[in-house]
Image (cartoon, rainbow, N blue to C red):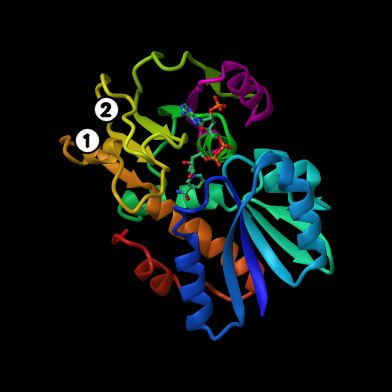
């Protein structure tokens, strides 16, 4: 039996083990997905263990997606452009980094648009957060020709993101946290705020799209409010979770992910 790890902190609430273990069982694959709560100072040792043990690969989540990039043996071009890794594949004791968050984000947004394509082009989009997930979303949105504002609690990290993410000479613009400009056409919550019931953008009129990456069993306050607001399309973090997971599954196993089985393992229909 090979293991697949989830490396992050916190990971106890994660819905990924249920999804991946249901998929392994469905396909009769002898693998087991396990959450490994990993502090910052344990990351190097955890990766060394991965190189030695019978481990197929891993997901990497908050707060390690950017740090881990520098600790791997190889990183694919897209993960390098994003500057973050959320999926590791182990091949012959070498660890190779990939990023499936960007694919998951694009797929979730497209499906929420009735599967008629990516809805944003030349739009103005506010991203809250400047971590690994924010980087993947910022690159996707710039590639589709949008204007991206970044608001982050630590403005220095937002500046670093804005310098390093670029498409055709266009960079994201840094705006103040938490009281920046009103979101134009869409807002993306790429922070964990909402996981424990925290409000975000409480006093702000919601734009026509609200994309909340927080993947929780219970809807976040932002998702609840957006769903109750007329003419707002909501993208729930669970939908992105499903599609990034399917792509990660395919990287580890080399076979198509059983999407319906993975969807059924989630606590809500997405
Ligand atoms: P990172 O650790 O890379 O980044 C975390 C970001 O959240 C940083 O910008 C950080 O700000 C901000 N943040 C953390 N705590 C707070 C707080 N209390 N108040 C304000 N800002 C805060 O994590 P990721 O980018 O990987 O993940 C961010 C969120 O996106 C998580 O909730 C994660 O679960 C979710 N996500 C969901 C996915 C899905 O498929 N649905 C995929 C990927 C991520 P600062 O720089 O100031 O510390």
| Residue 18 image offset from top left, x and y in percent | 45, 67
User: Residue 216 vs residue 59: left or right?
Assistant: left
Q: Is residue 146 magenta?
A: yes
Tell me whether circle 2 and circle 1 mark residues in contact (CB < 8 Å). yes
Residue in the foreground of this view, choosing between 110 and 49: 49
Q: How many numbered dots are placed on residues in this image?
A: 2
Q: Is residue 49 above or below residue 168?
A: below
Determine the secondary structure under disc 2. Answer: loop
| Residue 49 image offset from top left, x and y in percent | 78, 60
Residue at x 26%, y 19% (from the top left corner): 203
Determine the secondary structure under disc 1. Answer: helix
Single out the mark in the foreground, 2 or 1.
1
Residue in the foreground of this view, choosing between 149 and 110: 149
| Residue 82 image offset from top left, x and y in percent | 65, 39
Residue at the disc numbered 1: 225
* Label 1: few (<14), some (14–19) or many (≥20) C-alpha neighbours in 10 Å: some
Residue at the disc numbered 2: 206
When asked about the image quadrant of residue 32, the answer is bottom right
When asked about the image quadrant of residue 3, the answer is bottom right
Which quadrant is home to the C terminus? bottom left
Residue in the foreground of this view, choosing between 107 and 51: 51
When asked about the image quadrant of residue 70, the answer is top right
Tell me how far mark 2 sits from mark 1, CA to CA.
9 Å
Q: Is residue 202 magenta?
A: no
State which region is magenta: 142-168
Q: Tell me if residue 176 can be seen.
A: yes
Label 2 beta carbon within 8 A of ligand 1:
no
Residue in the foreground of this view, choosing between 9 and 172: 9
Residue at x 84%, y 65% (from the top left corner): 93
Which quadrant is home to the N terminus? bottom right
């Amino acid at each position: 039996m090979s293991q697949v790890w989830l490396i992050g902190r916190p990971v106890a609430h994660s819905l990924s083990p249920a999804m991946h273990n249901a998929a392994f069982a469905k396909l009769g694959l002898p693998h087991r997905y396990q959450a490994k709560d990993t502090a910052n100072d344990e990351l190097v040792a955890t990766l060394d263990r991965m190189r030695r043990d019978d481990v197929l690969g891993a997901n990497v989540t908050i707060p390690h997606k950017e740090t881990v990039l520098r600790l791997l043996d190889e990183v694919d071009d897209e993960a390098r452009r994003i500057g973050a890794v959320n999926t590791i594949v182990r091949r012959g004791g070498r660890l190779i980094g990939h990023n499936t968050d960007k694919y998951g984000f694009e797929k979730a947004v497209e499906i929420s648009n009735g599967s008629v394509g990516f809805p944003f082009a030349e739009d103005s989009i506010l991203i809250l957060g400047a971590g690994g997930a924010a980087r993947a979303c910022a690159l996707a949105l710039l590639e589709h020709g949008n204007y991206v504002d970044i608001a982050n609690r630590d403005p220095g990290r937002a500046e670093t993101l804005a310098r390093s993410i670029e498409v055709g000479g266009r960079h994201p613009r840094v705006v103040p946290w938490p009281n920046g400009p009103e979101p134009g056409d869409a807002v993306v919550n790429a922070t964990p705020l909402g996981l424990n019931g925290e409000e975000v953008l409480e006093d702000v009129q919601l734009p026509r799209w609200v994309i909340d990456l927080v993947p929780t069993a219970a809807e976040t306050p932002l998702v609840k409010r957006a769903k109750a607001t007329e003419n707002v399309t909501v993208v729930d973090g669970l939908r992105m979770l499903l599609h990034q997971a399917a792509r990660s599954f395919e990287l580890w196993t080399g076979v198509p992910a059983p999407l319906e089985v993975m969807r059924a393992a989630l606590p809500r229909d997405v």
